[in-house]
Amino acid sequence: MSFAEQFPIVFAALNEGFFQTLKLFGVTLAGAIPLGLLIALGVMSRFKPLSAVLKTVVWIVRGSPLMIQLLIIFYMPGMLFGHPIWGGGETGRFWAASVAFIINYACYFSEIYRGGIQGVPVGQSEAGQVLGLSRRQVFFKVTLLQMVKRIVPPMSNEIITLVKDTSLARIIALQEIIWAGQAFMKGRDGISGQLWPLFFTGVYYLAFSGLLTVLFGKLEKKLDYFKV
């Protein structure tokens, strides 16, 4: 089979794998961004038992490889309960990977949130209280808005890292784009022993990361109204 005949087949397979990658990316962000904020607030809570537990969880998650976390979340429930809770299909693998990624990135995001919140000058909160705002209003109308400006650079870095980390999901046989590229080395659709599809997956990652870099750059410019 010539390259011209192989390319449409490979391109279709890579697109299918990249769609799975995009789904995992989107679900992870949708879950990790709010969960990370809740964890950050819990870590800063005056209720010491809650703060201590969450600090321990964040330490464990940040200190262990994401690949190990994927394996534990996918296989451990089956070992404990005697049957796999995720099922053996692609859907089950996807949701197991999503849970692992959400927990992992929520813990990283929580530290970024915490640094952003604590980086807002105390005087800003005091000024809001002097104006008669409640603690809730001070947080959402003063602290949170200024925190957003501070966390965009580190958050954008983590989100771009997430794009590449999605490739780790293949450890539990989730058929994302790297899996799709590797399949043509082992044999798929009459094509085997081909390395170029795997290298071509890098184009997808570069294009997507480049798009995100541009979008985050524009977001930073829009948030310049916080400059003094």
Image (cartoon, rainbow, N blue to C red):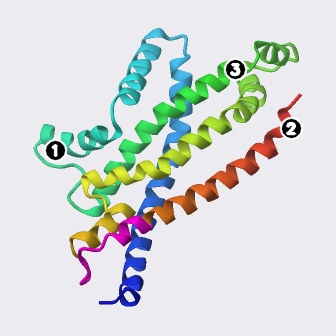
How many residues crowd around disc 2 within 10 Å: few (fewer than 14), some, or many (20 or more)? few
What's the magenta region?
A: 188-200
**Which of the two discs, 2 and 1, labels the residue nearer the N terminus?**
1
**Which of the two discs, 3 and 2, labels the residue nearer the N terminus?**
3
Q: Quadrant of residue 158?
A: top right
Task: Compute the Cα span from label 3 to label 2.
Answer: 17 Å
Q: Where is residue 130 in the image (x, y as percent from the top left)?
A: 86, 13
From the viewer's perspective, is 207 left or right of 107? right
Q: Which residue is the site of mark 1?
A: 78
Q: Which residue is the site of mark 3?
A: 119
Where does the C terminus fall, quadrant-wise? top right
Tell us which disc is closer to us: 1 or 3: 3
From the viewer's perspective, is 30 left or right of 178? right
Q: Position of residue 166 (x, y in %)?
A: 41, 52
Residue at the (40%, 65%) spot, across then down? 199
Where does the N terminus fall, quadrant-wise? bottom left
Q: What residue type is labelled 3?
A: Gly
Q: Which residue is the site of mark 2?
A: 225
The answer to whether the residues at label 3 and label 2 have Cβ atoms under 8 Å apart is no
Which residue, as the protein is rendered here, is positioned at the far left?
82
Task: Compute the Cα span from label 2 to label 1.
Answer: 51 Å
Q: In which quarter of the image is residue 53?
A: top left
Majority secondary structure of the magenta segment? loop
